[in-house]
Image (tube, rainbow, N blue to C red):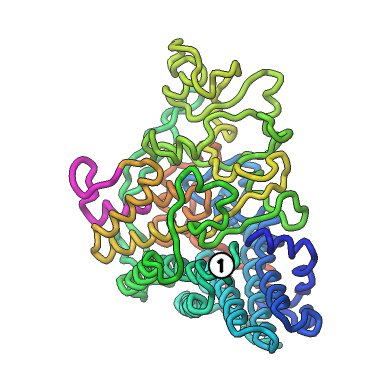
Amino acid sequence: MMKKILILLLSGLALTIGLTACSSWIEEDPKGLITDERVGDSEEAVQQWVTGTYSKLIYDMFCWGYFPRVLEFDADYISGPDWLFGTFGAGNFQGENDVTDALWKGCYGLISRANTAIRHINAMSNVSDESRQNARGEMKFMRAFAYFLLVRAYGDVPLQPEELTDHYQQPRQPIAKVYEYIVKNLEEAASEMYQNTDSRWQPGHVSAGSAAGLLTKVYATEAAAAMPAGTEVVVRTGPTYDGSGDDRSYAPLQRITLLKQTVTGYANLDPQALYAKAAEWGRRLLAGDYGRYELLSYDDLWKKSSCTASEFLFSVCTVSGDATYKVSVHSQYEGYMTEQGSDFIEQGGWVGCTRHWYDLFEPQDLRVVKGVKHRWRAKTQRESNSGFYYPQNNDYAIRATGYDLLGNYVAAPTGEFADGVNYYYSQDAQCLAFTTKYMDVTNNAIDQADANWPFLRLADVMLILAEAENELGNSSEALALLNEVRERSSATVASATGVGALDTQTKLRSAIIEERAKELACEADRRWDLIRWGIYLDAMNAIGGSDDAGVLKTRQPRNLLFPIPAPELNTNKAITENNPGWN
C-alpha cells in the first residue's frame, strides 16, 4: 500500500468497514458490514472499499508482529532468540496465535473484505467502468493472494462463497480446486487492473503486472510440488557445529543431495504443463505486456523511497509511528535506536540468518558486503565501550579486533572498526547474519517504524522463471535470468562450462533454488521453497538438531502442514478432521 492509503486509514475511512464476530472465520456476517448508503456511490466510495480491504494486511495481520513471523521463522537458514521463536519457531504450531490469528483468520478476513468490496462496487452506478473494473481487479488479486498463502500452509482449505449466504459450514476443497480458483482470479485481475505505466494507476497499489508475476509464482509452486518423487536437489547445509562445549566452531557447508518427497495433494498434476504456464506468464511480464519492470541497482533496492519502484510488484508500505496500523519489521530485523543518530540499539534486532546461509556467498557479493550488518552496538554496551562484529572468520576478526582467530596480533582494527570500540563476537542469538534490508526508515528510534515489506519482487519472478525454463529444458534462458539477478549484486557470473559449471539440469535447478535463498533472505520465502520442492524435512533435519542460536530445527512429517485452528474446527462442522499429526 502507498502512503495515501495509510493516510486514508488514519482518517478513519477504512475503520468504518468492520466485521463482527461470526460462527466461522471463513464466513462473513452481513450484519457487521456497512452498506452502500453509508459509504456512498462515487469514485471516492470505490477507493474506500479498496482501502478497507488493503488495511486488513496491516491491522490484524502485521500490527501484532505475527506477520511476517508466521511465514518466516520455520526455515533452515533463519534464526533468532529462543524466546522470540518460541514453540512455533521450534516446530510446534498447535495453538499458536501466528497460525490462528495471523494466517487463517487474517487471510479469511482479507477474503471477506475483498468479496464484500466487489459486491458493493458492482452495485454502484456513479462510477466509471474503468475505475470499477480496476478496483474489482485489485480485490481479486487480494483474494487470490490470501488463498495462495492458505493453500501453501494448510493444503485443502474451504473456499468462501462470493455471495452472501446464511450457510456458514464450508468444507475443505482439494488443493487443485483451490489453485484453479486462484488462477481464475489472477487471470481476471491481470486483464482488469491498470498497468503501472497507466497514468490512472496509483503507486503502491497492485497492478496488472502484480497479477502476472504472482501467476508465475503460483504455477511454479504447483509445478515443483508435482515433480516426481526422487527428483534431485543439492543443498549446501549440514550440522551447525564441529565439536562441542567451549571449543565448538561452525562446521563447513556440505553439498548434500536431497531426493524430493511426494507433496500431498499435487501428485496428479502435470509439472511440465504447469511450468509451461509459469514460463508463459513470466515471459509476458518481462516482455512488457503488463507494464514496465526492471531491477533496481543494489544501492537503491532497499531505500524506503523505492517502495513503489517497479521491482516491487506487491509491497506493503507503511506510515511512521502509527499506533494502530503498525508493523514491527524494522524492530524485529534491525532494532530501533535509543535516539535518532545514535549508535546504540534500544531494543530489537533479533531475527537474522545463520552462518551456513552467510557462507553461501562469495566475499564480494553485495548481499553480504552491504546486505549484512558487520558491526552494531546494544545500549548495554555503552558503558563498556564495546560492540559486536560479524562474522567470526579470520578476516573480520582481524578487521574488528586486530587479532586473528588464534589470538595472534596482526594489525590495528581497520575501516568501520577503527573507532576505538572494543568489538567481540558472541556465539549465540546476539550474533547472527542480520540483514540491512529494513534499515531505511523515517525515524529509526521508534518501535513502529515505516519499514516496507516486499511480498513479491521482480527478482523473485525472474528466478521463478529461470526455474521454469530449466525444467522445460531451456537451460541457456534459465542461466541468463539467474545471472541477471547475480550480476546486480556483483556475484560471479555462472556458466555452463568450466570450473563449477552448471552443465546439468540438476546443477542448474539447485543453483536457482540456492540463489532464491540468498536473494530473498528475510522475505519469508525459504520455507515455502523447501515445502514445494518436497525437501523441507530433509533440509531441516540436516542441521542436526539446533541452529546457531539454539533454535530446534528437527522436524517431523506433521510439520509439512500447519494445523487447522481449533476455533475453526469447533465451529465449522463441515471440517471433520485436522491435518495429519495435529489433534
In the depicted structure, whether residue 41 falls above or below residue 458:
below
Q: Nearer the viewer, residue 298 or 333?
A: 298
Q: Is residue 32 left or right of residue 109?
A: right
Residue tagged 1: 206
Q: Residue at x 77, y 69 (%)?
A: 13
**Residue 55 in the image, given as x and y percentages of width and height:** 69, 65
**Residue 429 in the image, given as x and y percentages of width and height:** 58, 35
On-image quarter of the C terminus: bottom right
Type of amino acid at the residue the image marks with label 1: Val
Residue 266 visible, this angle = yes
In the depicted structure, whether residue 24 falls above or below residue 304:
below
**Range of magenta residues:** 493-514
Q: Nearer the viewer, residue 253 or 391?
A: 391
Magenta stretch contains residue 577:
no
Residue 579 visible, this angle = no
Q: Nearer the viewer, residue 166 or 12?
A: 12
User: Splitting the image into 4 quarters, where does residue 468 fall?
Assistant: bottom left
Q: Is residue 97 left or right of residue 11?
A: left
**Residue 173 in the image, given as x and y percentages of width and height:** 52, 79
Residue at the far front: name it. 199
Residue at the far left: name it. 498
Residue at the far top: name it. 409
Q: Is residue 440 left or right of residue 555?
A: right
On-image quarter of the N terminus: bottom right
Q: Residue at x 79, y 82 (%)?
A: 31
Label 1 secondary element: loop
Q: Residue at x 42, y 62 (%)?
A: 532
Q: Residue at x 34, y 68 (%)?
A: 279
**Residue 118 in the image, given as x and y percentages of width and height:** 64, 81
- Local crowd size for mark 1, using a 10 Å CA cut-off: few (<14), some (14–19), many (≥20): many
